[in-house]
Image (tube, grey):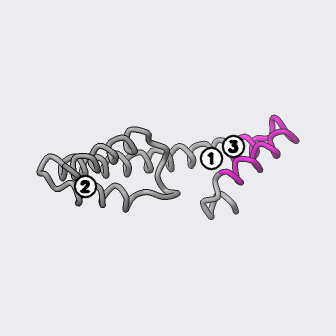
Amino acid sequence: ANLDRGELEKAAQLAEEARAQAPRHRGALQLRDDVREAIAQRDRALKKAADDAIAGARGDAKRGEYAKAIARLKKRRGRFWPANPWRERFTAQLARARRK
């Protein structure tokens, strides 16, 4: 149920608990694998979204549209963004360029 609702961390914890109780149970192993795959898919989608936003912001910045580039990056922040120190550094660079 947690996996279906997208609560992947809870699902992973439950899958590990089930596997600990029945280490060779086929269903427990399959659940663990399904959760791991769902987490990997989510992480790939988040990275792609971040990469796409950064690429778009770089294009905006090359055209001198610094405000648009910064807005694009800030709009995509929040819990859906993976940690990305490059994005933070790039946003700071854009803000400095905009002030010049």
The mark nearer the N terminus, 3 or 2, is: 3
Find the residue positioned furthest to the top: 24
Of the two numbered discs 3 and 2 in the rendering, the one whose residue sits closer to the viewer: 2
Vertical placement of residue 5 versus 23, above or below: below
* Residue that carries the numbered disc 1 in the rendered image: 34
Extreme right residue here? 21
| Left or right: 47 in relation to 94 | right
The residue nearer to you, when weighing 33 against 83, is: 83
**Rendered image: mark on residue 69:** 2
Disc 1 on helix, strand or loop? helix
**Is 22 or 44 nearer to us in this picture?**
44
Left or right of 16 on screen, residue 99: left
Disc 3 residue type?
A: Arg
**Which range of residues does the magenta coloring cover?**
9-31
Which residue shows up at 69% across the image and 43% down it?
A: 32
Q: Residues within 10 Å of mark 1 (few under 14, many from 20)?
A: some
Q: Are marks 1 and 3 in contact (CB under 8 Å)?
A: yes
**Between 43 and 81, which is closer to the camera in this rendering?**
81
Structural crowding at the residue carrying mark 2, measured as other residues with C-alpha within 10 Å and reported as few (<14), some (14–19) or many (≥20): many
Q: Quadrant of the N terminus?
A: bottom right
Q: Which residue is mark 3?
A: 32
Badge 2 amino acid: Ala
* Magenta stretch: includes residue 100: no
